[in-house]
Amino acid sequence: MLQNYKEIMDRSKSQVTVLAEDVYTAFERSCEAFANDDIEKATEAKKMMKDAHNQSNKIDNEIIKTLALFSPEAKDLRVLIAYLKITNELTRISDYIRGHAKHIKMQISGEVDLTLLKNNAISFHESTKKSLRAAVDSIHSTDIERLEHIHRVVNVEESKCDDIFSILEKSLLEQICVLPEQASDFIRFLDSMRKLERISDRSVDIVKLSFYAQKGGKIKI
């Protein structure tokens, strides 16, 4: 019985980390698609996230079954609760990635000129990617000092995302004033960037949940 329980706990962690790595890889593809105007990479990113909701539901169902059958306590209970919340965060991030990939494909085939925004937008993607990488690393980690370091990293990158987004928003408004006929395209682009900003926010939440799983205390997200 105990061995079976340990196997189930190990499998839950493995499933969550696999989902997290898939989400990160898909976002990497979308970043490459944006930087290089690569429709194929955007299609690949969107396709990778097609089954994310099903993966998340399977993980959640197994965790709920584990809670019902074994009534875990203390750290094991914290870990399972954290996993339930982490899968929700990953699912929402997968939605943002699918939407972002779709927007990239429309952007590449459209006529809007993003040349003046490209450098800042790429920096924004890179900082968001670092935030998500930190979140994935936190799921892998059980060391408190390592988690504290990851927490500092993700907060720095999330702050960078906020700063770069503010710059992008100002630049886009200036572009709209110059090219009002393309206002709808610029607004769609801004909306896509705003959703990327939420990826960094949710990455911070994932790190907090990973920290809670290992150290306890109150969940603060």
Image: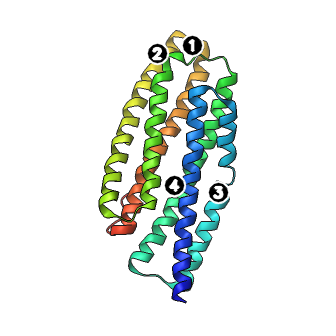
Q: Foreground residue, 207 or 112? A: 207
Q: Which residue matches tag 2?
A: 174
Mark 2 or 3, nearer chain start: 3
Q: Which residue matches tag 1?
A: 180
Task: Give residue 89's mark.
Answer: 4
Q: Which amino acid does the dot numbered 1 rest on?
A: Pro
Q: Quadrant of the C terminus?
A: bottom left
Mark 3 or 1, nearer chain start: 3
Q: Which amino acid does the dot numbered 2 rest on?
A: Glu
Q: Which residue matches tag 3?
A: 53
Say above or below: 99 vs 72: above
Q: Quadrant of the N terminus?
A: bottom right
**CA gap, disc 2 and disc 4:** 34 Å
Dot 1 lies on which element?
helix
Please identify, in this view, whether the residue under mark 1 or under mark 4 is nearer the observer: 4
Q: Would you say 195 lies left or right of 151 here?
A: right
Say above or below: 58 vs 195: below
Say above or below: 140 vs 112: below
Say above or below: 88 vs 31: below
For the image shown, how many numbered marks are present on the structure?
A: 4
Tell me the residue at 69%/50% (across/down). 50
Horizontal and vertical percent position of residue 127: 43, 37
